[in-house]
Amino acid sequence: MTPNTTNKLIKLNGKPPAKHNGQGASKRVLSDHVQDSIDEYFQALNGHQPTDLYRMVMEQVEAPLLRSVLDYCDMNQSRASEVLGINRGTLRKKLKQYDIQA
């Protein structure tokens, strides 16, 4: 695991990120992008009440996560379930839910 990967994992677990990358600029992690996107979503609502936000966010994040991990694991579902930290049956259920072919 590279130092940058470790720092990203630490940030995702609620701890401070790495201070800088090699060029002096602060690195942004996934949680920063998610928060920015949700803030933009709320602004775009223009006063309208959001509904079912949790489901919407999970669908927007979970499907690309599954695709990326499967690609990383060369479509091996057993290995992908280990990488994700979920049961293989749960992975298969989610693949069906999002109509992802593996």
Image (spheres, rainbow, N blue to C red):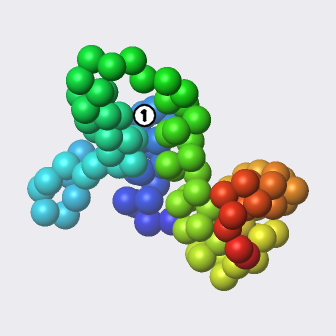
The residue furthest left is 24
How many numbered circles are shown? Answer: 1
Residue at 73%, 61% (x, y): give it: 95
Pick the residue in front: 22 or 44.
44
Quarter-wise, where is residue 41 in the image? top left
Pick the residue in front: 101 or 23.
101
Is 91 positioned to the left or the right of 83 in the image? right
Q: Looking at the picture, how far across and down is residue 27, in whole percent?
A: 25, 52
Badge 1 is on which residue?
Answer: 15
Give the amino acid at mark 1: Lys
Is 1 positioned to the left or the right of 94 in the image? left
Residue at 66%, 76% (x, y): give it: 73
Q: Looking at the picture, how far across and down is residue 78, in whole percent?
A: 81, 69
- Report whether residue 39 is seen: no
Q: Looking at the picture, how far across and down is residue 46, in whole percent?
A: 23, 23
Residue at 42%, 23% (x, y): give it: 50
Q: Is residue 45 above or below residue 56?
A: above
Pick the residue in front: 42 or 19.
42
- Report whether residue 81 is seen: yes
Quarter-wise, where is residue 70 in the image? bottom right
Quadrant (top left/top right/bottom left/bottom right) for the C terminus = bottom right
The residue furthest right is 89
Q: Looking at the picture, how far across and down is residue 97, in whole percent?
A: 72, 54
The residue furthest bottom is 74
Q: Is residue 102 above or below residue 11?
A: below
Question: Under tag 1, what secondary structure?
Answer: loop
